[in-house]
Amino acid sequence: MGFGSYDESEQKEQTTDDEDVDAVNVHENDHQGEMSFESDVSTDELVDQLGSMKDDDEDEE
């Protein structure tokens, strides 16, 4: 057919050697704690900056 030969025997019993595979620990990089920062800029000034950034993005579209 032009797509090459197909051997069903290769598809029937695919085995893997699970002993060589390391388990994934999804909690390996979990961190508990707090984060804080100090800024000389007031919340109102930051909100105004955010608003102007959003306005700039809308103008570009």
Image (tube, helix red, strand yellow):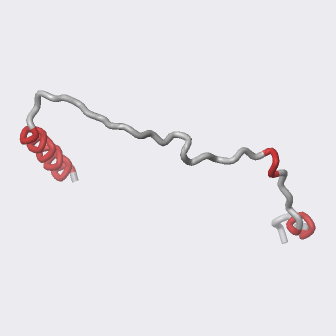
Front one among 35 and 50: 35
**Whole-percent x, y for residue 6 in the image:** 88, 67
Above or below, 50 against 16 in this view is above
Above or below, 24 against 6 in this view is above
**Whole-percent x, y for residue 44 in the image:** 7, 42
Quadrant of image for the C terminus: bottom left
Residue at horizontal 85%, vertical 61%? Answer: 14
Quadrant of image for the N terminus: bottom right
Query: Is residue 20 toward the left or the right of residue 49 in the image?
Result: right
Front one among 60 and 57: 57
Q: Quadrant of residue 12?
A: bottom right
**Whole-percent x, y for residue 2 in the image:** 83, 67
Residue at horizontal 89%, vertical 70%? Answer: 8
Front one among 27 and 7: 27
Marks counted in the figure total 0
Residue at horizontal 20%, vertical 48%? Answer: 57
**Whole-percent x, y for residue 5 in the image:** 89, 66
Query: Is residue 21 toward the left or the right of residue 44 in the image?
Result: right
Front one among 27 and 39: 27
Residue at horizontal 64%, vertical 47%? Answer: 24
Work out which residue is located at the far front of the displayed protein and give it.
Answer: 33
Query: Is residue 51 toward the left or the right of residue 35 in the image?
Result: left
